[in-house]
Amino acid sequence: MTDPAAEIEEILVLHHSHLDVGYTHSQPILWRLQTEYISETVDWLERTEDLPEDCRPKWTCEATEPVRRWLAAASPAQVVRFKDLVEQGRIGLSALRWHVSSLIDRDGLRRLLAGKRELEDVVGTPIRVACQHDVNGVPWPLADELIDAGVDLYVSAVNRHLGRPISPRPGLFDWQAPSGRTLRVFNGSHYTMFDQLLSAWDDSVEQMAKGWDDFHARLRAAHYRLPFVYLTSTCSPIMWDNAPPNPYMPDLIRRWNEQGRGPRIRYATFDDLRARIERVPESEIPTVAGDWTDFWSFGAGSTPVATAVNQRSKPLLAAAEALGAGPALLAEAAERVDLFDEHTWSYWDTEPGNLQAQAIETIKQAGAHEGHELAAFAVMDGLERLAGNPVADKGITRVLVCNPTAHQRTVSLELPETWFAEWTPATERTYRPSRMSYENRPWRVPGADERRHATGPIELGPWQWRIVERESLPAAQFPGQPTHEVLRERTAARELNFATAVNREAATGLITSPFHVLTYEPDSGRITSLIDRATGREILRPRPGMDLLSFVLERADPLVDGSRRAFYRRDLDREKIDESCWEPWVAIHEPAERVLHCRVEERPGHIVLERAFAAPGTRSLIQRIRLDAVDPVIRFDIEVDLVGDAAPRGVYFALPLAMDAEWRAEFDTAGQAVELDEQQLPDASRGWVTAQSTAAMWDAHGAVALITPDAPLVQFGDFHFGPPPERIERPADPLLLSWAANNYWDTNFPQIQSGPVKLRYGLLTLPEHDPVEIAAQAAKLRSPVLTWPVTSGGHGPSDGVL
């Protein structure tokens, strides 16, 4: 590195497209354009091979997927030309498939790198650099996955719109992965900054010189110490994203270099940047550790149904693989799942009436559903094979029970009543497609009024499966059967001066399981207490309108500013020089208005407390709370029917906790536990996080873990959407918030969330923080035990391990 006052020796310009799968065009059109760009690039680079070296253009394919699609359609001659340009260093490649949201899981991260190996086989050279543009962070385990794949440089280009980059930017550091190994990171400016900061789009050396002087002054003020500057260029301001090669730029670079108005500019690929970075002394590169927690992923709350569906598909993919599903089917399902995790959700103009936005949003969300259906088919097909069912048969005589996880389990089953029906010649016939009906899906949450056949506890080891005769299934008897009672207390009091005393009756409901005691008011439906029986600890500190995973609608106060400008006043001229546009804002938080009904249903092995609410911004809201005889996790099924409204708003489910000040918190990302603040990179998102499945909080008296397999967005302590905090305050009696839906984005994400949303949650209470137990219980809730009908001609009683 150089002295802070040293001059910059050169400016490296990376020319690229910036891949958004959507945003500028619908997905089918976008993919065709991206492959056209590569053909255009090959032609353009060959035509310009005689230009002077500095202005001889280079092109970087920043994502592998467009290249894979182009190679699949290219002629052998085109592939040879492409390889020649790669060998000459005029086409650069990168390691990752596309730019991703933080919804991605560990298996998804590995698939994100699959194209790297394919391209290396084609071009015959290793790809050492990976990049992510736009997104404000990536899951911490990506660092280890990149290192394992042979990547030694990661390049970031954060778009600070509704987010924030980490520091230093621009800058260089070593990122310590969860394994303890380090990955070099160039934390670059937002993409297109060559065009923006240097006004390159004006095609004027004079304007470039003014832009460079201003940028150089800011670099000096920030004590930037590298002897080079790295910036990227697309075709802005006409095409900021999904841009083709820009044939007008080489001549501008030539004129700049000839006039000597500043550092020499040269085209560069990621490999050129890597070579330049290798000259920086190791001793002068700092090391930092922690999760690069993303701000942008809060946009996943704009599609709560599709997001939940896609999250449910991931454990299904793992189960299908364990059941031996065919690679082609798994790949087809994973393709849809992974594409939903890509960072683009809509069009740049997301006004609700925009037809292009509607097209992109429909295609995006349809992919999540299609991926889920393919994964569901793969699992059911695997269960059919494991059961040995003939294609057509008569009668169901046995039940297959399968544990698709690495954890020991004790479960009680609730099987379709149709499996135990009295057969007639007309109804005993069973066919493979009839068994694959939606009603037979074992991970489906049954309807409240759906008849089910309950069994007693069944023990299953890791990955164990068992085929059991129907008559041999354990009876639905539970020594720890939860109980319910209502206590009534009568009082008399005079309420008016001349009136006689009035008799009043107060009712208190108690639901007791082996693990918890829940107290509620039958008349109001309000939950007043939740006791952990193992420790005697009170879990809740109810607030007005908030008790146990309570609905809260957040919206901007219209008496102050009810628009999206209340919290973010975007100004591209400020953003390009890394100034924040966040604004403190006045938010209104509205709980449910009243309970419409509150009832308790006692079933073998568990009790369900059901509450229906009238709540703002909804047509209906039903919450079912299940306390179990054998499962320590309290389960929640929430059904909320949202009224569509384009005004900015968020939907939360709030858990007010009884906890000392200075509590600690943790969430998981791509399977990695991350402690809030302590294991996050400086300036990464703290106000909201994207959890794969769990969010835990604890103090000296015990721990609470919210298992959230369907709704990944979480906030700790209080409502934090707004200007990013440097660190989360730790007051006593904090909130743990599931952020189920929002429409706060003004671009790229849908502005209306309407219709029924069904979400699952689990609540685990522990005497102390136990990340191993939390992860195990989360895995069980995400991946329920699989059950399947075994027909008369299927396999007999047996067991094994997947």
Image (cartoon, grey):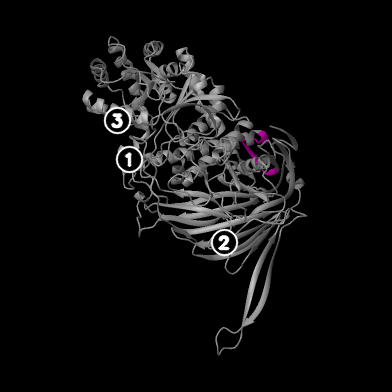
Give the Cα distance between marks 1 and 2: 40 Å
* Left or right: residue 322 compared with residue 236: right
Q: Give yes or no for contact between labels 2 and 3 (Cβ–Cβ under 8 Å).
A: no
Label 1 belongs to which residue?
356
Q: Nearer the viewer, mark 3 or mark 1?
A: 3
Q: Earlier in the sequence, mark 2 or mark 3?
A: 3
- Find residue 619 and report its horizontal and vertical position in percent: 45, 59
Magenta span contains residue 390: yes
Residue at 27% across, 21% down: 249
Q: Marks 2/3: CA distance? A: 60 Å
Which residue is under mark 3?
A: 214
Q: CA distance from mark 3 to mark 1?
A: 38 Å
Considering only order in the chain, which callout, 2 or 1, is on the residue closer to the N terminus? 1
Amino acid on which disc 3 is placed: Asp
Please name which of the two marks, 2 or 3, marks the residue nearer to the observer.
3
Please tell me which residue is depicted at 57% across the width and 46% down the height of the picture.
708
- Magenta stretch: give its range: 386-397
The numbered mark at residue 611 is 2
Which type of secondary structure does the marked residue at label 2 adopt? strand
In percent of width and height, residue 181 lies at: 58, 25
Q: Amino acid at mark 1?
A: Gln
Amino acid marked by disc 2: Arg
* Secondary-structure class at tag 1: helix
- Is 527 above or below relative to 564? below
Res 316 quadrant in image = top right
The 10 Å Cα crowd at callout 1, few under 14, some 14 to 19, many 20 or more, is: many
- Give the quadrant of residue 521: bottom right
